[in-house]
Structure formats: structure tokens, C-alpha cells
Image (cartoon, rainbow, N blue to C red):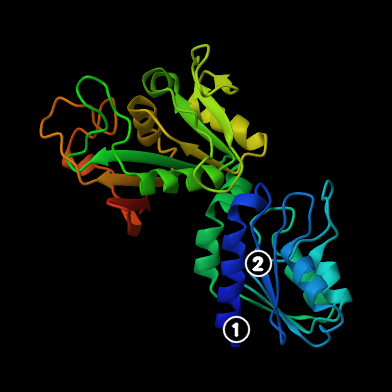
């Protein structure tokens, strides 16, 4: 297996544990020859490198390890043995790393330690693919804030609800299942109190396997709302994100409503927009749109992003957009 094929498999393994590894980075590792594989276990468990080494047993002398993120080093508070030490001690000859760890406690030190102990290290194979997968982790480690995913759903004519306020089930079951996967991939889900009053969402993971995220309501949720138990917060949105990041929240999924979406967008607090578009039309301009509040006053001020993914989900279309 060549370097790119082996690294592609390591990244695939990392993606498979996206919903269970966080807040730790989700990492995959492959040892060749032999095709021994590993992926990050749930917090407190083994890192991907340790899983792959344990699978290989004694069959690692002069082997090559492919890992989607730089092996970690020892630092205060770390719950497992340093992977860089384990790799060197086991006699692995060569390590191929997709990307450096952006965590300032590691950043380059794992690579340096391996080289100091005689291990041949190559960095950058499929870097862009690994970085895209680990964007939430990198954002949290470099900014202190969680990676913010803003989920939006609308008809083809950009409406999120009928004029009478009814809004549930604009999209189909497949899209709703996809949203549940977004929830499973996130540490917290944020919603405005107005959406809680209007739609009474539970914001749990029910349609896919995974853990329920923390539920954060901006404002006060009515007694008896399905979102309980939840954290009710008020104040500046940036300060709320700072607090969540300090509490170890790596990714936040924001599910509405239009006022919250508008404020996040105008303040540049969104890292990724995920828009589900249903093949439906209200056919008028009296239903609410995706964002509430003032928009760009002139064409020159229009926000422009970069479409990074488009795919059909059931009868609906999912469009992922990031800042250009």
C-alpha cells in the first residue's frame, strides 16, 4: 500500500469515530506492513496510535505508521501515555503524519521527539483532507471557541415558516436524520427561546446512533418544554461561545431561529453554514426568511462564501458553505 492509500485509510478511520472521540481529536492510524488499524477511543481510552500498535503486537519493528494527526506528547492533565514515546519505544522505523497538531501543548513537539529518537518522519500527506476533518478541533485549540455550525432549512424560495408561524417538517425524513448526525457530532446544540416556544424541539439524537449533545437555550425555556434539562443562558453571543469553549465544547450546532441566525451571521461567528433546501415553494413574500434583522445594504456588502459540499439527502438538497 502506498503512502496516500494508507493515509486515506487512516483518515477514514478517524472519520468513523467523529461522534465518539470528541472533545479529544478524532484520529486514525495504520501500521504497514500488516494493515493493523486503530482509531481514537472514547475519552479516557486509547489513542489511535496505541490501538494500532496493540493490534500489531510484536510485528512493528521497522514498520511504517500512518497517522492523521501528529502523535501527542506528555503534558499536564493528559490521561494517556504519550503516543510519540510509545511509537519510538516499539521500534517503528517511519511515521507518516497528515498534519501537525494545532494544540499549543503539542504543536511540532511530537514530530521533533520522534526525529530525536531516530524515527524517520514525513509530514503533509493528504494534509488538506485531514485538516478538513479536524477543522472543529483546530478551531477550538487555536481560538478557544467552539467551531460553530449554523444549520438552516428552507423552501426553494428561502422561507423557513408559513405566515401563520407553522414551520416543522419543511424537509423530509432523510434530512432530519442527517441533522441528528450533526447533533451526534456536536458537543452542544444551541437554540433561541423563541424557537423553543414555537416548535418545542427536543434537540436529542434519536434517528442515529450517538450521544445527546448539551442543550443550550438562549433565553428562558417554558416549563415543561421538551428541551429540558437544558442550560439557559443570556448575554452576548461571543461571550457565550467563549464560555462554552472554556468548558471543553469543541463544536456547537446552532438550530435557530432566524433572529439568532441573523446575529451570528452579521457578527461573523459562523464557521460553517449547513443549508437544507426542500423542493417546496410558499410562493409569496409573507413568510419569514432564513435570517431576521438587517441584511447587507448594497450588493458590494453581500457576504460571499465558498461551497464546500453539495449532496442530495432524500428529496432535499444539503449545501455546506464556509467563508471564502
Q: Residue at x 28, y 43 (%)?
A: 303
Q: Residue at x 53, y 73 (%)?
A: 126
**Depicted 287 relative to depicted 109: above or below:** above
Which of 306 and 20 lies nearest the eye of the viewer?
A: 20
- Tell me, yes or no, if residue 104 can be seen here: yes
**Depicted 220 relative to depicted 153: above or below:** above
Q: Residue at x 69, y 66 (%)?
A: 70
In which quadrant is the N terminus drawn? bottom right
Q: In the rendered view, does 189 fall on the left or right side of 152? A: right
As helix, strand or loop, the secondary structure at mark 1 comes to helix
Q: In the rendered view, does 87 fall on the left or right side of 138? A: right
Q: Position of residue 30 (x, y in %)?
A: 68, 76
**Depicted 229 relative to depicted 87: above or below:** above
> Circle 2 is placed at which residue position?
28
Q: Position of residue 32 (x, y in %)?
A: 70, 84
**Depicted 5 relative to depicted 277: above or below:** below
| Alpha carbon separation for disc pair 1 and 2 | 14 Å
Q: In the rendered view, does 3 fall on the left or right side of 307? A: right
> Circle 1 is placed at which residue position?
3
Q: Position of residue 231 (x, y in %)?
A: 59, 23
Amino acid at each position: 500500500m502506498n503512502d496516500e492509500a494508507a493515509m486515506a485509510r487512516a483518515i477514514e478511520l478517524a472519520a468513523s469515530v467523529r461522534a465518539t472521540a470528541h472533545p479529544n481529536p478524532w484520529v486514525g492510524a495504520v501500521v504497514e506492513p500488516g494493515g493493523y488499524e486503530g482509531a481514537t477511543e472514547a475519552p479516557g481510552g486509547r489513542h489511535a496510535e496505541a490501538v494500532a500498535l496493540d493490534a500489531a503486537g510484536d510485528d512493528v519493528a521497522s514498520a511504517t505508521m500512518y497517522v492523521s494527526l501528529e502523535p501527542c506528547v506528555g503534558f499536564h492533565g493528559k490521561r494517556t501515555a504519550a503516543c510519540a514515546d510509545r511509537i519510538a519505544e516499539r521500534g517503528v522505523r517511519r511515521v507518516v503524519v497528515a498534519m501537525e497538531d494545532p494544540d499549543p501543548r503539542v504543536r511540532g513537539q511530537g514530530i521533533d521527539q520522534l526525529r530525536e529518537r531516530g524515527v524517520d518522519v514525513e509530514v503533509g500527506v493528504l494534509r488538506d483532507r485531514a485538516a478538513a476533518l479536524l477543522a472543529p478541533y483546530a478551531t477550538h485549540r487555536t481560538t478557544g471557541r467552539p467551531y460553530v455550525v449554523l444549520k438552516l432549512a428552507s423552501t426553494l424560495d428561502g422561507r423557513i415558516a408559513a405566515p401563520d408561524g407553522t414551520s416543522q417538517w419543511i424537509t423530509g425524513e432523510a434530512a432530519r436524520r442527517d441533522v441528528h448526525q450533526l447533533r451526534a457530532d456536536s458537543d452542544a446544540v444551541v437554540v433561541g427561546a423563541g424557537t423553543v416556544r414555537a416548535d418545542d424541539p427536543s434537540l436529542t439524537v434519536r434517528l442515529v446512533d450517538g450521544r445527546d449533545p448539551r442543550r443550550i437555550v438562549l433565553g428562558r425555556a417554558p416549563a415543561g418544554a421538551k428541551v429540558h434539562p437544558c442550560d439557559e443562558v443570556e448575554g452576548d453571543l461571543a461571550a457565550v461561545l467563549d464560555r462554552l469553549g472554556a468548558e471543553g465544547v469543541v463544536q456547537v450546532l446552532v438550530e435557530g431561529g432566524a433572529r439568532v441566525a441573523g446575529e451570528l451571521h452579521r457578527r461573523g461567528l459562523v464557521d460553517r453554514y449547513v443549508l437544507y433546501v426542500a423542493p417546496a415553494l410558499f410562493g409569496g413574500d409573507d413568510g419569514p426568511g432564513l435570517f431576521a434583522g438587517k441584511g447587507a445594504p448594497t450588493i458590494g456588502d453581500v457576504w460571499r462564501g465558498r461551497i464546500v459540499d453539495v449532496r442530495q439527502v432524500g428529496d432535499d438538497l444539503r449545501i455546506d458553505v464556509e467563508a471564502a
